[in-house]
Image (cartoon, helix red, strand yellow):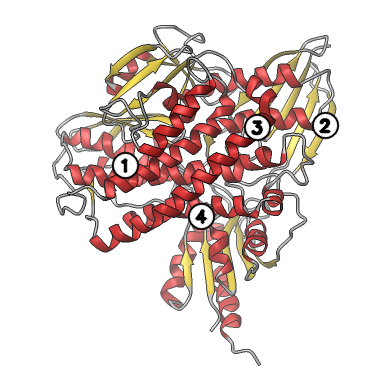
């Protein structure tokens, strides 16, 4: 069984920004065999957590795009990337790159995201993000299921 | 023709900011402004909420310093209840607060500022980042991560999770410390002390490389303000009193009850930024400029309060005859505070009553108004609440540590710009030094939200007519 790490990050009192932690908690009920983290934001020490995983899934809300638009894609280490910003703006690519360089290994990493429509001061979701939740769950399940299949 | 240079956003700080540098007709720097374009809004958000929700709600202000807001908020709620919390509960809060200092200072030094310090202010920006640090000094990069982990592990062990632990509550803490927990936490500390001692040794050796920056990075006389412990040492939990010293190190005010802050702190507003300008009322605005945070604290205490940190503080004070004035030395002060925090945590974990089950006091609200003050990594943090007869918040005022330093940051940027800006050409070295002086204060302008995607650094030269006559981008 691959070691799967799910990082659902965001601020639960900033509306759609909280979709990452919400989904991570929902997934945890279904897949207790995975490891789940729900940080407010991505921080450098998560690189070590990543180095100990085989598969990582980052769940987050995006600014860009049409509200409710769901995306999923793989991120790979990019050691030549210019990383002028390295603070609360850490992103999945920076983290997997840091894991690769510092600890010599990085997991297969994927982002599952939805474009948010409301980042105001509230703990609910916009209608667009609310409607996107089943698809977000589905995409995360697909990645976990693929990771769970035995190698042939 | 007078011109304006804009740096937008400032990178490697918490939150987003923009800097405008105003040039006169000869291309000389007139002044510089740091613009904070975010509205926090938490003071309004909490109106109508039950007071006991405040610690966990206020912790959502920031993902880097939630523990600091937890502490100040819980202390304000203690005051609303009119309780004195059991000493073991207070000591457990202190340990968590010290862990917060460790993890936050480690982030600032190792991950945000070390690219400038290790690789040089004039290094190629393609290399002057954390990957450059990892390549040139992987040990330093790993040390930073390890120190962050130590702080986070202490917070997680006590609070149940790393971010936004709900363990700190009005009246004390939710759960006592177990003997097993104590042993686990004590086992973390020796590694942390080793890391910080070798980092201090490296940093002190490298100071000669930064003579120009030390001379020009916010190096001016000002007041310094912070809480001191009952013995006059470092005391982040804020159960001592406020002390204010001047640029020569002389005490201006001492034994000040922090809950009387409206008597001596005013807040000015400028139309070009959302961040207010706190000032020392007896001197007036803007002359009543003061600094808070690590540099201020080391300038105003009698001693640190732990053996190794006291040795380092004595050496630190040899830098100048009075107070240490250069804001560049915030970095140095941060390292000494990490050392102190680790030593102090160890002392508290060995306290004879630390495993006591008596960690919380219970009461209904007994006061209509409560003020909580503590020292956050970036400086003095004040939470001030008023409630109705149902215990619901009807008014809140927060004075965030970064706000105290607003006047000082603006003056520091002007000083750096005057020294390094020449003519109307945008130069990489100038840009980075202007940003680096802001980073020295480690401002937390955290927007409490984030999303995938990053804003690039954009620099514009704009004429008074609004015409962009030069532009540079990176990131």
Residue B436, disc: 3
Q: Which residue is mark 1?
A: B54
Image coords of residue A18 (percent x, y) = 49, 55
The chain carrying label 1 is: B
Which residue lies at the image location 79% right of the left edge and 21% below the top edge? B466
The reply to whether dot 3 and dot 1 touch (C-beta < 8 Å) is no
Which residue lies at the image location 27% right of the left edge and 45% below the top edge? B348
The chain carrying label 4 is: B
- For the residues beneath circles 1 and 2, the answer to whether they share a chain is yes
Q: Which residue is mark 2?
A: B471
Of badges 3 and 1, nearer the viewer stands 3
Question: In the picture, residue B382 is in which quadrant?
Answer: top left
The chain carrying label 3 is: B
Counting residues from the start of the chain, the first of labels 4 and 2 encountered is 4
Counting residues from the start of the chain, the first of labels 3 and 4 encountered is 4
Q: Circle 1 sits in a helix, a strand or a loop, which is it? A: helix
Horizontal arrangement in the rendering, residue A81 relative to residue B337 (left or right) = right
């Amino acid at each position: 069984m691959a070691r799967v790490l799910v990082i659902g990050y965001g601020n639960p009192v900033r509306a759609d920004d909280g979709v990452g932690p919400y989904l991570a908690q929902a997934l945890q009920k279904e897949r207790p065999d995975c490891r789940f983290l729900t940080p407010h934001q991505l921080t450098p020490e998560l690189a070590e957590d990543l180095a100990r995983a085989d598969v990582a899934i980052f769940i987050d809300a995006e600014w860009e795009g049409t509200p409710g638009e769901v995306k999923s894609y793989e991120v790979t280490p990019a050691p030549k990337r210019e990383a002028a910003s390295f603070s609360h703006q850490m992103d999945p690519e920076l983290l997997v790159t840091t894991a690769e360089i510092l600890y010599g290994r990085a997991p297969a990493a994927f982002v599952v995201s939805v474009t948010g429509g409301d980042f105001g001061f509230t703990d609910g979701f916009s209608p667009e993000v609310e409607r996107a939740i089943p698809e977000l769950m589905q995409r995360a399940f697909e990645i976990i299921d693929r990771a769970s299949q035995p190698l042939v | 023709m007078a011109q304006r240079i804009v740096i937008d956003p400032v990178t490697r700080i918490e939150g987003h900011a923009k800097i405008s540098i105003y040039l006169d007709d000869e291309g000389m720097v007139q002044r510089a402004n740091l613009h904070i374009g975010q509205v926090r809004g938490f003071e309004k958000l909490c109106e109508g909420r039950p007071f006991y929700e405040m610690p966990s709600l206020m912790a959502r202000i920031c993902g880097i310093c939630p523990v600091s807001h937890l502490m100040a908020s819980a202390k304000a709620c203690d005051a609303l209840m009119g309780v004195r919390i059991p000493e073991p509960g207070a000591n457990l809060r202190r340990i968590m607060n010290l862990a917060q200092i460790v993890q936050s200072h480690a982030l600032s030094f190792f991950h945000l500022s070390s690219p400038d310090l290790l690789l040089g202010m004039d290094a190629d920006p393609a290399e002057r980042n954390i990957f450059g640090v990892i390549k040139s000094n992987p040990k330093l990069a790993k040390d930073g991560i390890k120190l962050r982990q130590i702080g986070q592990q202490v917070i997680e062990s006590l609070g149940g999770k790393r971010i936004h632990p709900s363990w700190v509550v009005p009246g004390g803490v939710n759960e006592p410390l177990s003997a097993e927990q104590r042993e686990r936490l004590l086992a973390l500390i020796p590694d942390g002390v080793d890391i910080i001692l070798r980092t201090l040794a490296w940093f002190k050796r490298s100071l000669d490389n930064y003579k120009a920056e030390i001379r020009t990075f916010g190096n001016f006389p000002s007041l310094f303000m912070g809480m001191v412990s009952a013995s006059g040492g470092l005391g982040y939990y804020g159960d001592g009193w406020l002390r204010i010293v001047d640029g020569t190190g002389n005490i201006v005010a001492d034994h000040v009850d922090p809950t009387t802050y409206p008597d001596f702190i005013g807040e000015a507003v400028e139309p070009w930024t959302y961040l207010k300008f706190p000032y020392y009322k007896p001197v007036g605005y803007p002359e009543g400029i003061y600094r808070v945070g690590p540099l201020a604290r080391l300038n105003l205490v009698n001693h640190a309060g732990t053996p190794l940190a006291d040795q380092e503080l004595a050496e630190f004070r040899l830098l100048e005859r009075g107070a240490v004035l250069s804001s560049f030395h915030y970095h140095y002060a941060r390292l000494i505070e990490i050392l102190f925090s680790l030593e102090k945590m160890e002392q508290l974990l060995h306290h004879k009553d630390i495993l006591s089950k008596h960690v919380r006091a219970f009461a209904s609200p007994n006061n209509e108004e409560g003020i909580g003050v503590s020292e956050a990594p970036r400086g003095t943090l004040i939470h001030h609440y008023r409630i109705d007869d149902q215990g619901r918040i009807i008014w809140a005022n927060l004075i965030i540590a970064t706000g105290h330093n607003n006047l000082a940051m603006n003056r520091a940027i002007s000083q750096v710009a005057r020294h390094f800006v020449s003519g109307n050409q945008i130069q990489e070295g100038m840009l980075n030094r202007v940003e680096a002086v802001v980073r020295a204060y480690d401002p937390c302008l955290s927007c409490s939200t984030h999303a995938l995607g990053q804003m690039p650094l954009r620099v514009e030269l704009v004429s008074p007519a609004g015409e962009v006559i030069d532009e540079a981008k990176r990131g």
